[in-house]
Image: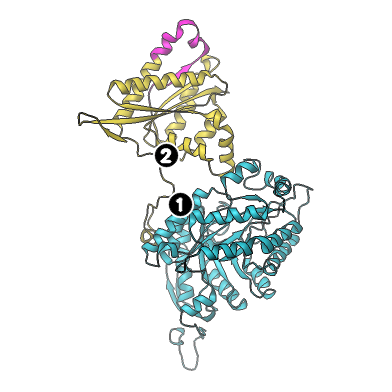
Chain colours: A yellow, B cyan
Amino acid sequence: MTLSDAGGGRMTARTLAVVSAGLSQPSSTRLLADQLAAATRDELVRHGEQVTLRPVELREHAHDIVNHLLTGFPSESLRQVLDDVTGADGLIAVSPIFNASYNGLFKSFFDLVDADALSGRAVLIGATGGTARHSLALEHALRPMFAYLRAVVAPTAVFAAPEDWAGGAVDGALRARIDRAGRELADLVRRSAPSDGPADPFALTTSFDQLLGGQDT
Amino acid sequence: MQFGVFTVGDVTVDPTNGREPTEAERIKAMVTIALKAEEVGLDVFATGEHHNPPFVPSSPTTMLGYIAARTERLLLSTATTLITTNDPVKIAEDYAMLQHLADGRVDLMMGRGNTGPVYPWFGQDIRNGIPLAIENYDLLRRLWREDVVDWKGKFRTPLQSFTSTPRPLDGVPPFVWHGSIRSPEIAEQAAYYGDGFFANHIFWPAEHTRRMVGLYRQRFAHYGHGSADQAIVGLGGQVFMRRNSQDAVREFRPYFDNAPVYGHGPSLEEFTAQTPLTVGSPQQVIDRTLGFRDYVGDYQRQLFLIDHAGLPLKTVLEQLDLLGEEVVPVLRKEFESLRPAHVPLAPTHASLRAAAGGGGDNTVHAVDDVTGRAPEQAR
């Protein structure tokens, strides 16, 4: 969406979907997601953009996600979430690492996203885990999944282990990684055209003459 | 407005007693359901077509021909005829034959089939589903409307001087519906030809139906077949009734919880809220069904699914009694009083024949070896 500011110039309102697959409440995964979102928002605001954050706590939709996998359609509230995620200008996706990969809830949710829906979309990935030894799961699990979806994933992926949250560590190395990742995502979002919103699955994209003529659609 | 039942023809274990019907029992049960549908005053019986277990109806015209011989008024239809994996030549022949045997009490609903492995068994590929549906149906129409067809396409061997026999009864092809859940191309196809559009409307949210019917109506008008509210719309629906709604919920729940398609997923209450499934009293079914009109407009055909998920035949026949005695008479009256005069009823053989100027014998005689006349000159 494009808004005109009082000076007659153009100012864009950007939306960031912030998906957290943490299971406990409160969750360190959500904490990391919120910090990544805040860093990205601050950077965009510094460049004169308006930002709307759309946080998504997958735990709240866990049953609906399984139901969608089984029935083939989302509940109304899950449909809204999917529209928020596929229609945003940027996506922050954070999962806890279980058994060397994203957790099942995270994967099940993104299995419901159409393979084209995130194409070209700016994405920042993050993860949490019980030990820093899990950190490369970001590179061998989350990044390839978004590469498959043809998203543009920020170079910095942020992993937070328990020691990163301990004591004053939040102001140390983790803080620096979060800020760098937020700048990278903000740059990607600023360089892309505003999102057209979620795709309409019922839109007719071809004429019948084309269909009858056997042209590929 | 037409009311009827459509069956998937699944052989499913009754979850309340572990009993699984044999194929023979299920096939005979489908026939019994059709005969009962006529007996209680319904208008339509439609059978699915499947070519894989746990489904029995692989040969719809065999079943419908048998039912035709044992009924007087019942309109025989399909839900759906696989326009992708069947040879359109065989569809043209089979359903024209059925038309003659059933004195015109026949129409069809085209569908693509969503089971990937079935396609290669018939030499096709599910990724070509839409192009197959488009090309095959266009050929099918010509086979019913042109006595001699020369044709070439992508998916079937070419035809030269081919005549599909028997010719449609009275020279009037059966009316065709196109069924689809969420493929706008199929709504477009139905609109292009001025055919009917049928929304599955059982396992899916009402929103799907609203969008698809809206698109079909708009394109129907675009192609000049009439105004949008004159397009021919059919809907599915799924009901389970007892006089007391709590009894209906209690009795249906184990069938719901274990059903193919949605079993082990959402709760009965969630699914009832999210889809048109109605489990309750006849009055609840009446109220819910009348509400369909709010999002699709005046429509021409309502088919109910009542016999899947392992429900025993006795229970299904009780459902038909409730439909025939309490539900459909009220719906018929209410829908008819709401329907504006310019909105047509569903086409039937009689109405199509009248529209064609009365029809007539359409027999194409073989080349005469005395006169040398070819079919092209024979009419």
Graded by Cα atoms within 10 Å as few (under 14), some (14 to 19) or many (20 or more), the crowding at tag 2 reads some
User: Please, what secondary structure does the residue beneath circle 2 have?
Assistant: loop
Please state which amino acid type lies under the numbered disc 2.
Answer: Ala
Graded by Cα atoms within 10 Å as few (under 14), some (14 to 19) or many (20 or more), the crowding at tag 1 reads some
Between residues B374 and A78, which one lies in front from this camera angle?
A78
Between residues A178 and B333, which one lies in front from this camera angle?
B333
Q: What residue span does the magenta drawing correspond to?
A: A154-176
The part of the image, by quadrant, that contains residue B63 is bottom right
Please state which amino acid type lies under the numbered disc 1.
Answer: Arg
Q: Verify CB contact (< 8 Å) between mark 1 and mark 2.
A: no
Return the residue at label 2.
A117
The part of the image, by quadrant, that contains residue B374 is bottom left
- The chain holding disc 2 is A
Q: Residue at x 48, y 73 (%)?
A: B143
The residue mark sitting in front, 1 or 2, is: 1
Residue B69 image point, x, y percent: 68, 75
Q: Residue at x 44, y 25 (%)?
A: A125
The part of the image, by quadrant, that contains residue B187 is bottom left
User: Please, what secondary structure does the residue beneath circle 1 have?
Assistant: helix
Q: Residue at x 69, y 61 (%)?
A: B320
Between residues B328 and B184, which one lies in front from this camera angle?
B328
Marker disc for residue B211: 1
Separation of disc 1 and disc 2 at Cα?
20 Å
Q: Is residue A165 visible?
A: yes
Residue B250 image point, x, y percent: 73, 45
Residue B57 image point, x, y percent: 65, 61
